[in-house]
Image: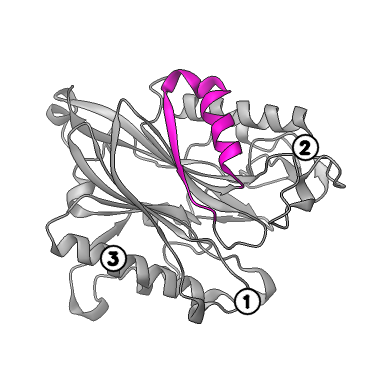
Amino acid sequence: MLFPQLLKSQTEVIAFHNCENFFYPTNDSLTNDDAFTTSSPRNWNWERFNLKKDLLAKTYIALSKGNLPAIIGLCEIESQQVLNALCNDSPLKKGNYDFIHYNSPDIRGMDVAMIYRKDKFKIISHEQIVIDSSLIIDEPTRDILYVNGILNKVPLHLFIVHAPSRRNNDRNKPLRKSIFELIYKKSKELYDKGEKNIIIMGDFNDNPWDKSVEEGFRTSGGYHNHQPLLINLMKKDKNKIGSYTYSGQMLNFDQFLVTQEMQEKIDTITNPSHVFIPDFMIDPNPKITKTTPFSTYKGYKYQGGISDHFPIFMKVLTPKQ
């Protein structure tokens, strides 16, 4: 990306964040959310909810250096109530945000969602992509959110995903790969129709260099003797920086994949890293050797941190308005 393009463009921020169990404190009888209610052993009360909501908002403001993000993909979101509070009853209120959310079959009620600034991003369509029941190995999982819209005259196709976890001896590994293959297939169909600006964002529960990601999204150069359609922006971060830490291991589960045409619109001069790691999000425990997000809970112990994941973000160059 060249400096002249930066000077002629309007920069907009697109982010993704795993919010870590962002539940509304009241009980939802339709989901298994009992671990995060006012009567639960974790004592997830209104004071803690409001603090987390405001801290998340302040994180996204800091991430964009005051220029509120145009688009934020989110996961571990329980409901529209949570999103409404985040958009309209937090420091994000001045951004005039709206949200897109579908209830998914996830038994805990954990969904993906997207919030966006109505003055920046114009929605054309959105869709809940349901995972075929024949692929389910363990239990129902989150759906994929697809959104098509225009960001300052730039058409965008966005996929937001929270792939199944590695619990139960990683039984869901084949399912994750199937989900990645499904997103790749839909991305390829769009691309072949001339829709070139594609962004896939999410918590993949796998690293960019893991086989499931490389084969599912076909990001390896020699895979099937083709030029990769998608570029993983986090692949260069191996052993350097991560968005999540587990058992002392730095992981890159949170990722952006983009087409070449989309990559050419991303500012990599002022934004060489796509992981946001401010001091106020780092666990202060001196015994921890790896840079670790300061989580809201550690097991059942309330810590008051923002999330167990660092957010990821990109700066997109759009025509000046």
Q: Residue at x 61, y 68 (%)?
A: 166
Q: Which residue is mark 3?
A: 186
Q: Which residue is mark 1?
A: 138
Q: Amino acid at mark 1?
A: Asp
* Left or right of 189, for residue 30: right
Distance in Å between CA atoms under marks 1 and 3: 24 Å
Asked which quadrant contains residue 208, the reply is bottom left
Asked which quadrant contains residue 67, the reply is top left
Residue 168 rendering spot, x and y as whole percentages: 69, 74
Q: What secondary structure is marked by label 1?
A: loop
Q: Nearer the viewer, mark 3 or mark 2?
A: 3
| Magenta-tinted stretch | 78-103
Q: Residue at x 30, y 71 (%)?
A: 218
Q: Which residue is mark 2?
A: 303
Residue 272 rendering spot, x and y as whole percentages: 34, 39
Q: In front: 123, or 66? A: 123
Q: Amino acid at mark 2?
A: Gln
* Left or right of 138, for residue 72: left
Establish if 9 lies above or below 263: above
Establish if 233 lies above or below 204: above
| Mark identifier at residue 112 | none
Distance in Å between CA atoms under marks 1 and 2: 31 Å
